[in-house]
Image (spheres, rainbow, N blue to C red):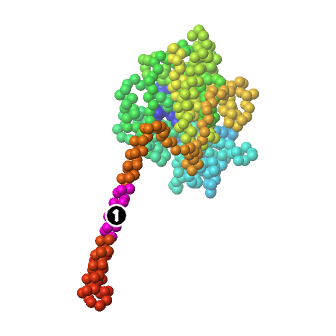
Amino acid sequence: MMPHKATADETGELHAVDVARSNSTVQKDTKEGQTCIGKVKSFRGEWGFITSDSLEGDVFLHLRDNPGLPPLSPGETVEFTVGGSERLHAENVRLLRRTSPLSELLGQICSGTVRKFSGEWGFITSPHFDGDVFVGLRSNRHLGGPLVTGDIVEFRITRDVSKEKDTFEASNVRILSPATHATTSPVLPVLPVPVPSRSRSPRKAREMATLVGKKSFRGDWGFVISESFAGDLFVGTRSNGHLSTSLKEGDMISFRVEIGSGKAEVENDLDRILRHSRGKSCSYVCQKYIENPLLIGGARKHDIRQWVMVTALNPLTIYFFSECYVKLAAEDYSLDDFGDRFKHLTHTVIMKNHPNFNPDDEDWRCQWTQDRYRSLLSEKAGYDVWNDKIRPAMQKIVVNSLLSVAEVLSKSENHSCSFQLFGYDFMVDDEYNVWLLEVNDIPMLKASGPVTSRLCDPCLREALGMIFDVDTSPKNEGLRFELLYRGPEIPKLPKTALEFSVDGRKLLPKAIPGPARAPSLRLSARRDQELQDLMDKRRLKEGKEQQEKERQLRLRRSLAKKLLGGKSISSPCLENLKDRHVD
């Protein structure tokens, strides 16, 4: 399904919007016009806040009060003058330290200017670091051509693995503004360097942005960028039904960022479901909602993520990971509000935006281990319902679902030398029946908390160990893929019909003994005799016709001899007679 109000990076944090801020307060001995040194607390778009040991609280900062000042990043050290009378703000702001070593910026997004570019390589300078950084087309083949000196670009700092010493290069380069030949240098739009502990996703607020990139909006969806965040953001007409006309590349728009699941929506209105799907080029999967899920952790909905490995299709070979984990909704389940994702969805990327989410808290990390889940089920049911009913049902669903698509998967030309890791999502209802929600062919294996931190690495290590025939059990602490199903091997059929041959003899009807054959024989003999008589009559008729022709020829010769006397009978008259005879 198309993502609904989803972001390109769905691990963003929720934050306060439309917050009214009171006037900053300063210490009693701080006067208007006093120069202070402080750090940028936050900065968004064209404004932010600065904290300082000389101030109590923070002070407001806006670029319009500081002409020539580029956008700032949290944590940067600045010198400023306290200005204003009714509302204090920072004036004459000057950066004291902006740069960082490249090793500290490893993996982060920066922006800069191409200082020099020749052939297939060059150098980029940036306010984020001293000196320059190497950039080459080898690591940026998506550019399609060389950069130009003066291009303003966005890039990621990565390690240059082709060199032995610790060197860095710019990768994932994206041109923000092509170089111009104007006499004045273009102003460099500095993107904030992200703090490692925080997300770089766009926040939930109203932003100004432009559509960028060739064909960045087609049909009913596209992407937008903004100076307020790095990367891009999905936009679709389905979530913006108020738009009377379609967007196009280059439109300047204002929008509010919403965090979306990118997975599914809950809807109880058939007309709205049909409106969603009508006239769309993509495919939709509609499933009946399970109204009676088993509730745990108070009254919270949950589902089970189980990893499954397919190592061969002929014979179909399925492995089942020894442990799964449980994903919980953040709030108690209720059918009153289908629009509340914290009640109806369980994706970790959504739950981490809940105000109470805490990866170090067993209840608010929204993830359970298999052992904790099994223990709770045993207390509820009074017996080991996990091993007796739920896990066997999950395994049966896995086998049947893969058997149903094995023929389709085996049509690939390289199916005999390939493998696949799947992520199965199951739901359990209040009667302990297991339901298949979906099968992810590219499951996320990035640890999002203590529960998945324990499972993800062993899962990947075990999967690669199975493929390359390496024993990884000592490092996996008993976590492994267990053989679940191995089907029969289907013999390969020849590709052409030239190798086919048929052995055997002709099948004849059974002989009928006794007198019953006499009538059949008499009938056959009579038919043969009739055919013979017809042939004899035809030959007799042809013989008589031939004799008549010869008699007529003799009469004509005798008549011609009498009329011509002793003259040669080879006269034209006789020849005419011969011709008539022949005709």
Label 1: element kind: helix
Q: Is residue 511 visible?
A: yes
Vertical placement of residue 132 versus 488, above or below: below
Residue at 64% over, 23% down: 323
Q: Is residue 41 visible?
A: no
Vertical placement of residue 250 versus 473, above or below: below
Of residues 324 and 367, the one drawn nearer to the viewer in this rendering: 324
Q: Main secondary structure of the magenta part?
A: helix
Task: Count how many numbered circles sit on residues in the image.
Answer: 1
Location of the C terminus by quadrant is bottom left
Per the image, is 59 magenta? no
Vertical placement of residue 339 versus 548, above or below: above
Q: Which residues, given as a range, are shown in magenta?
A: 532-546
Residue beneath disc 1: 540
Of residues 490 and 236, the one drawn nearer to the viewer in this rendering: 490
x and y, in percent, of residue 415 in the image: 60, 40
